[in-house]
Amino acid sequence: MRRYMIAGLLAGLTLTGPASAQQAGAADYNAATVIATIDGTAITLGHLVAARDQFPAQYQDLPDPALFNIILEQMVDQVLLANSLSTDPAEDPLAIRLRMENERRQSLALRALNLRMKEAVDEARIEAEYASRFADVAGKAEYSAAHILVPTEAKAAELKSAIEGGADFAALARANSIDAASSVRGGDLGWFEPGRMAPQFEAAVVAATPGAITGPVETQFGWHLIKVNATRDAVAPPLDAVRAQIAEELGRTALQGVLTEMRSGAEIDLSVTPVDPAAIRDDALLDD
């Protein structure tokens, strides 16, 4: 956030600054193409491109000439300010050197991560995982049900009598059910497939007639009154609906495998020098 604030400040200052050295004619270029020099310090096209994504979002939609000039003018100001403190990286303030090491490490790690993700998460793997995950969905039933959960069988029987006498199931669930997650919805559990509920609860749901009140049924959670609203054949979700989730899970699994392999082959000693964890907040350590 601090970096973005400074970038915005400098960019704002250069909006009224001198015109850049950008020429109307286009020449062959690459990342090493020198765009400007300030007291002997070169600014290359690569520097500008690498800095572009550090600018706040509102700058990204600017026309290319305007964005080019703003970044270049900021780079000029940065060189002037930076050179006023140090012109030799080896003589930079300690805090700067350490943060640059951290940023280099983080950038390389991110690049390595992106490469690993491209290898592990391609369309073929996503489609294969989708086919495997939903291969047995067809032919299964799904159930929409509501329940009232209470501590005792006597309380469940009392509520069932009230429902049979005309009391509203949802209203009784809101007033009496100890399942906080569903009671606010009148006991509604939404749609679920077999294997998601306690065995006794599931058996009662499968055997129930839609619309009828089943129970009391005991599970490890207490005593249930169950109302099955409807049943339907399960249908696999469209691939596009779960693509992002599958890609994320494949990537996370692949990354964990890579890190486990890397750690097993590395010499890692996390206890070289015991340090008080409170030292993590001692900014004075970075003072030269």
Image (cartoon, rainbow, N blue to C red):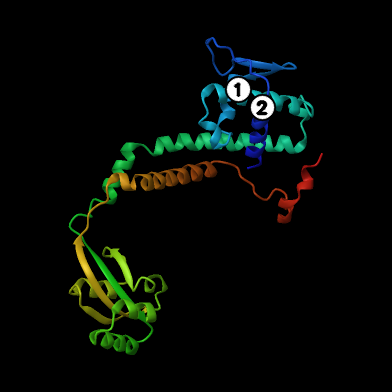
The crowd level at tag 1 (other Cα within 10 Å; few <14, some 14-19, many 20+) is: many
Residue 223 visible here: no
* Placement of 102 over or under 235, stated as above or below: above
> Which residue is situated farthest in the front direction here?
16
Q: Position of residue 280 (x, y in %)?
A: 71, 51
Please say whether residue 42 is visible from this viewpoint.
yes
Closer to the camera, 118 or 275?
A: 118
Tag 1, which secondary structure?
helix
Residue under the point 33% across and 42% down = 126
Label 2: few (<14), some (14–19) or many (≥20) C-alpha neighbours in 10 Å: many
Q: Position of residue 199 (x, y in %)?
A: 29, 72
Q: Amino acid at mark 2?
A: Thr
Residue 69 bears which disc, if any? 1
Give x and y (percent) for residue 255: 46, 43
Residue 149 percent location from the top left of the image: 35, 79
Give above or below for 163 relative to 71.
Answer: below
Which residue matches tag 2? Answer: 14
Q: Quadrant of the N terminus?
A: top right
Closer-to-camera residue (67/104): 67
Work out which residue is located at the far right of the displayed protein and give it: 288
